Image (cartoon, rainbow, N blue to C red):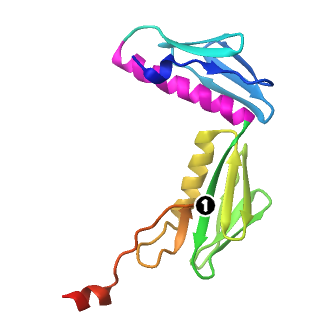
Amino acid sequence: MSRVGKKSILIPAGVEAKSEGGKVFVKGPKGEMQIFVRPEVLVQVKGNEISVIAHKPTKMTNALWGTTRALVANMVKGVTQGYEKRLQIEGVGYKARVEGEEIILNVGFSHHVKIKQPKGIKFSVEKNIIVISGIDKELVGQMAAKIRAVKPPEPYKGKGIRYFGEVVKKKAGKKVVAAAA
């Protein structure tokens, strides 16, 4: 049995939810979202509660049960509060700026790296902090990972793009290792 799947999801004021034809629709003040639901799992909306029910008790159904419940809960939170990821740029001369529908990164390459802003995502830059926000948790996390992958933090000086608050463990350089031997 899924401990996560058993919990019902409360629908806050100003949010509409419905389930029909294998899809779940959630509409709120920040936007609307929908997901497809596997046939092994049933999503019911009653009053101000959403409950997820597993049809056939198999190992796969239990996994889908908890996952579906988590996805629907993320949708409800996304349309009410939204999601945000912050990235920090470290390094001399490293910077980012937003121009129209894309973010432009100068991170030590001979060229600028341009990343387009997908629908439903908003970029903003404050000094050396990149803020990615939107209503879809998966898409916000995916865009943050894509931007971080352009120049991940290196272990010797710590230069690169990292998640805000991420600690990069630095390695000792060649001189320190040679002196110790």
| In front of the other: 40 or 5 | 5
Q: Is residue 58 above or below residue 82?
A: above
Main SS type for the magenta part?
helix
Q: Residue at x 66, y 15 (%)?
A: 49
Q: Is residue 172 left or right of residue 140?
A: left
Q: Position of residue 37 (x, y in %)?
A: 56, 20
Q: Position of residue 101 (x, y in %)?
A: 76, 56
Q: Is residue 96 above or below residue 144?
A: below
Q: Is residue 178 left or right of residue 94?
A: left
Identify the element where label 1 is drawn: strand
Q: Is 144 part of what is drawn in magenta?
A: no
| In front of the other: 95 or 86 | 86
Q: Is residue 150 above or below residue 45?
A: below
| In front of the other: 118 or 73 | 73
Q: Is residue 139 left or right of residue 5?
A: right
Q: In the image as oriented, which residue stretches furthest toward the left?
A: 181
| Image quarter hosting the C terminus | bottom left
Q: Is 72 part of what is drawn in magenta?
A: yes
Where, by quadrant of the figure, is residue 178 drawn?
Answer: bottom left
Label 1 sits on what residue type? Answer: Leu
| In front of the other: 111 or 6 | 6
Q: Position of residue 109 (x, y in %)?
A: 57, 77
| Image quarter hosting the N terminus | top left
Question: What span is colored magenta in the figure?
Answer: 58-80
Q: Residue at x 74, y 33 (%)?
A: 80
**How many neighbours does mark 1 have within 10 angstroms: few (below 14), some (14-19), or many (20 or more)?**
many
Q: Residue at x 70, y 53 (%)?
A: 117
**Residue at the disc numbered 1:** 87
Where, by quadrant of the figure, is residue 173 drawn?
Answer: bottom left
Q: Position of residue 164 (x, y in %)?
A: 58, 60
Q: Is residue 11 above or below residue 127?
A: above
